[in-house]
Image (cartoon, rainbow, N blue to C red):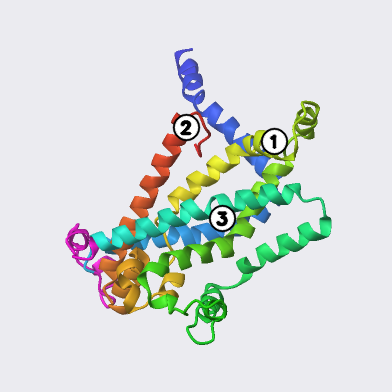
């Protein structure tokens, strides 16, 4: 008897795990078609998102292309100390933060306003036209967008300067004026992304119960009152989630557009972390130093994401987790 009891006791802990594995197997078989459709997404993230994380260790090494990642000597935090003590550190931090913050402040409300106004349009053909026109810049590459901006602002044949001269205002070479770089960048971001980002808010608006609008009409509310008292409060959870995500992306400014639009005259206000990484890491062949700067940028972005998520939850709103 003691031997049989011991065998039963030893077998009992394995029973729950076996049943969980059986349930997992049944779910995999049941959802096999969905899992097959989801496989390319998993492979994409494994190869292009999680795989490159291994290369981040070169930020803590004196990386040499000939020695490879493994054989390159460790230097600890030397690359980070070099960056923090660099004379351009605070200029890069200020430029990146200001450009990201101003872009967030001025561009974030635009897709919300666009979605709310599109919801109020009753002419179907006009609504479709506005949506198509606002989505179009999203499908153009950064190079095309930047080339269009350069052509529009050309001091000789640019449309903007021609209009200024037509109204008796002297033309201006906007792209070499440091005071104009941030407004140009922000306006280009609004033009490029607002239409596409409004899709999220249009989907949220479509999910609002029609009974809320009917109740507001009974109470005598007009179109504007329903917009501010029904539509916007109903999509506020979506707005908060998007604001948290945008705050996390605030400091991670893509180098492509900045690189195409800035020049030596605007370095003082246009040079950001990403362009600095491009110059030092790729053009200067200092891969470890560039990786350290990029890792610091990612750390600051993660900190902003965590802080914005915590503030949103403390204020009674929704959070990402």
User: Where residue 183 appears, x then y in whole percent?
Assistant: 45, 64
Q: Earlier in the sequence, mark 3 or mark 2?
A: 3
Residue bounds of the magenta highlight: 63-89
Question: In the rendering, which numbered label is found on residue 225?
Answer: 1
Residue drawn at x 36%, y 68% is 270
SS category of the residue bearing label 2 = helix
Q: Earlier in the sequence, mark 1 or mark 3?
A: 3
Q: Is residue 69 magenta?
A: yes
- Whether residue 218 sits left or right of residue 319 in the image: it is right
- Number of on-image labels: 3
Q: CA distance from mark 1 to mark 3?
A: 45 Å
In depth, the one of 116 and 294 nearer the eye is 116
Can residue 302 be seen by looking at this rendering?
yes
Q: Position of residue 275 (x, y in %)?
A: 36, 70
Name the image quarter holding residue 209: top right
Residue 178 percent coordinates (x, y): 36, 70
Residue at left 46%, top 71%?
A: 257
User: Alpha carbon of mark 1 to alpha carbon of mark 2: how far?
Assistant: 28 Å
Q: Which residue is mark 2?
A: 313
């Amino acid at each position: 008897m003691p031997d049989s009891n011991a065998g039963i006791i030893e077998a009992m802990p394995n029973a729950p795990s076996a049943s969980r594995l059986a349930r997992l197997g049944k779910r995999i078989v049941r959802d096999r078609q969905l899992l097959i459709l989801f496989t390319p997404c998993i492979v994409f993230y494994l190869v292009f998102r999680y795989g490159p994380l291994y290369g981040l260790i070169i930020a803590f090494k004196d990386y040499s292309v000939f020695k490879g990642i493994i054989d390159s000597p460790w230097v600890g935090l030397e690359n980070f100390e070099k960056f923090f003590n660099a004379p351009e550190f605070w200029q890069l931090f200020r430029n990146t933060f200001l450009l990201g913050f101003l872009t967030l402040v001025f561009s974030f409300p635009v897709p919300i306003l666009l979605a709310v106004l599109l919801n109020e349009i009753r002419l179907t053909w006009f609504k479709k036209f506005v949506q198509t026109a606002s989505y179009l810049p999203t499908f153009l590459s950064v190079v095309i967008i930047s080339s269009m901006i350069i052509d529009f602002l050309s001091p000789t044949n640019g449309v903007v300067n021609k209009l200024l001269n037509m109204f008796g205002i002297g033309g201006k070479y906007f792209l070499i004026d440091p005071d104009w770089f941030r407004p140009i960048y922000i306006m280009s971001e609004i033009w490029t992304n607002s239409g596409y980002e409004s899709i999220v808010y249009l989907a949220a608006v479509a999910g609002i119960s029609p009974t809320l609008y009917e109740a507001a009409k009974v109470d005598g509310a007009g179109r504007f009152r329903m917009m501010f008292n029904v539509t916007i409060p109903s999509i506020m959870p979506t707005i908060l989630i998007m604001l948290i995500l945008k705050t996390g992306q605030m400091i991670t400014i893509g180098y492509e557009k900045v690189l195409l639009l800035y020049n030596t005259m605007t370095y003082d206000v246009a040079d950001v972390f990403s362009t600095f990484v491009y110059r030092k890491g790729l053009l200067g062949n200092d891969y470890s130093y560039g990786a350290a700067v990029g890792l610091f940028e990612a750390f600051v972005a993660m900190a902003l994401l965590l802080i914005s998520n915590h503030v949103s939850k403390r204020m009674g709103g929704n959070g990402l987790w």
